[in-house]
Amino acid sequence: MTDELLEWRREFPVLEKTTYLISHSLGAMPRRTFERLEEYADAWATRGVRAWAEGWWDMPLTVGDEVARIIGAGAGTVAMHQNVSVCQSVILSCFDTTPETKRNKIVYSELEFPSVMYAYEAHARDGRFRVEKVKSDDGITAPLEPLLAAIDEETLLVPVSHVLFKSAFLQDARAITERAHEVGALVVLDTYQSAGTVPFSVKDLDVDFATGGSVKWLCGGPGAGYLYVAPRLQQKLEPKVTGWMAHAAPFAFEDAPVRYADGIARFLHGSPAIPALYAAQSGYRVINQIGVERIRAKSVRQTQKLIELAEEAGFRVTSPRDPARRGGTITVSVEHAPAVTRELIRRETIVDYRPGAGIRISPHFYTTDEELEHVVGEMRRIIDTRAYSAHEAAGAAF
């Protein structure tokens, strides 16, 4: 069988010297990124301050429109920020609650990404919000029914990872959103671990907000997070995490308070990270050119192959077996997993480890089947030959 997506391998320099299976953490950099960053430097060097009026100022929204194509959103619904923690804080700042407010509860699984939980629990310190965390029985999957039961008429927000970072468990975003809307709550869908490898549409799912970033499957690098706000909410909300880019007339330099811009622009804040936006576009354009449906088809095939290879080698797979409940990563539990991970990396086979799940292995559209066989074979050889020191085996998790 011919794998047409392998034609893209030449566009990713890191693949020339490594077995790169860590796109769940940092996607490979497109070769075009060198040129995009040079274009940024040239604009600054030759146009100076004029570069703002010649495109820089609009980039948080024009680049957002490129992300919108990937996540099934419309133009004018995505604003770029530095990271998801900022995006979540912008969302939280839209709501005025007190300890006496009936609808002030935030519900999420205990398996959400820690940075997201830090943001919500920090905002809950003064009592304006209260957090209810739903337990996981196995530390790998987030049970749906207890989460749905926790969402009630007192719930304000439900932040939910589309795909859990630790195990690649794919949550039922539609069922969660339907339940939330049934009781008047709003959903914040974290698509960091799904965008670019799992097809979905925020419009079709009818979520209220979506956040994510470019570091992982989008191959866009750090510093380019995105925030989607459903059109029905854009004019109703006024974020308190704000700045001059959110002003209706920023260059009028009016005195405070802020007079909000219309639409998605009101969810911006201070000056944007222009170099990161230049860099991120390269990955977005590759993903949009290939199409997430094609990427997903290959991902399902290769993750299934990884499961089979791992089990043949005697390893325990902790990711869901059903592809309909699995993102693009396979997690494998082995003895001394942190030390095995470090030895794999020393051998230029790039993976990582997460406590409670195991070694995370992620093929992407540029991965060969031979690389899957290689990583599992290397794991088996490392374990069989004890190719790590006792000190390494006792070391901290990677």
Image (tube, rainbow, N blue to C red):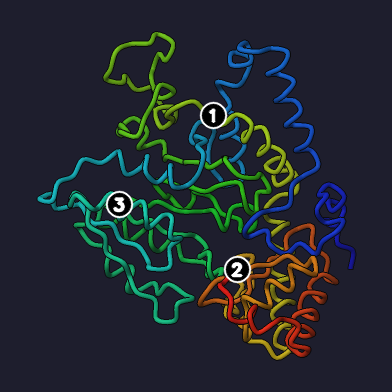
Looking at the image, the residue that sits furthest to the left is 100
* x and y percentages locating residue 251 in the rendered image: 44, 11
Can residue 331 be seen from the camera position used here? Answer: yes
Q: Is residue 396 above or below residue 389?
A: above
Q: Quadrant of residue 178?
A: bottom left
The reply to whether dot 3 and dot 2 touch (C-beta < 8 Å) is: no
Number of numbered discs overlaid on the protein picture: 3
Q: In front: mark 1 or mark 3?
A: 3
- Measured in 3D between alpha carbons, the distance from the residue under mark 1 to the one under mark 3, in whole angstroms, is 29 Å
Relative horizontal placement of residue 30, taking residue 331 as reference (left or right): right
Residue at image coords 34%, 74%: 135
Indicate which disc, 3 or 2, sits on the residue closer to the N terminus.
Answer: 3
Q: Which residue is mark 2?
A: 398
Q: Is residue 146 above or below residue 164?
A: below
Mark 2 Cα-neighbour bin, 10 Å: few <14, some 14–19, many ≥20: some
Secondary structure of residue under mark 3: helix
Q: Quadrant of residue 32?
A: top right
* x and y percentages locating residue 392 in the rendered image: 65, 78
Q: Which residue is mark 3?
A: 122
Can residue 325 be seen from the camera position used here? Answer: no
Q: Quadrant of residue 177?
A: bottom left
- Residue situated in front as seen by the camera: 193 or 275: 275
Secondary structure of residue under mark 2: loop
* x and y percentages locating residue 278 in the rendered image: 67, 32
* x and y percentages locating residue 387 in the rendered image: 76, 83
Q: Which residue is mark 1?
A: 61
Q: In front: mark 2 or mark 1?
A: 2
Q: In front: mark 3 or mark 2?
A: 2
- Residue situated in front as seen by the camera: 107 or 26: 26
Relative horizontal placement of residue 145, taking residue 394 as reference (left or right): left
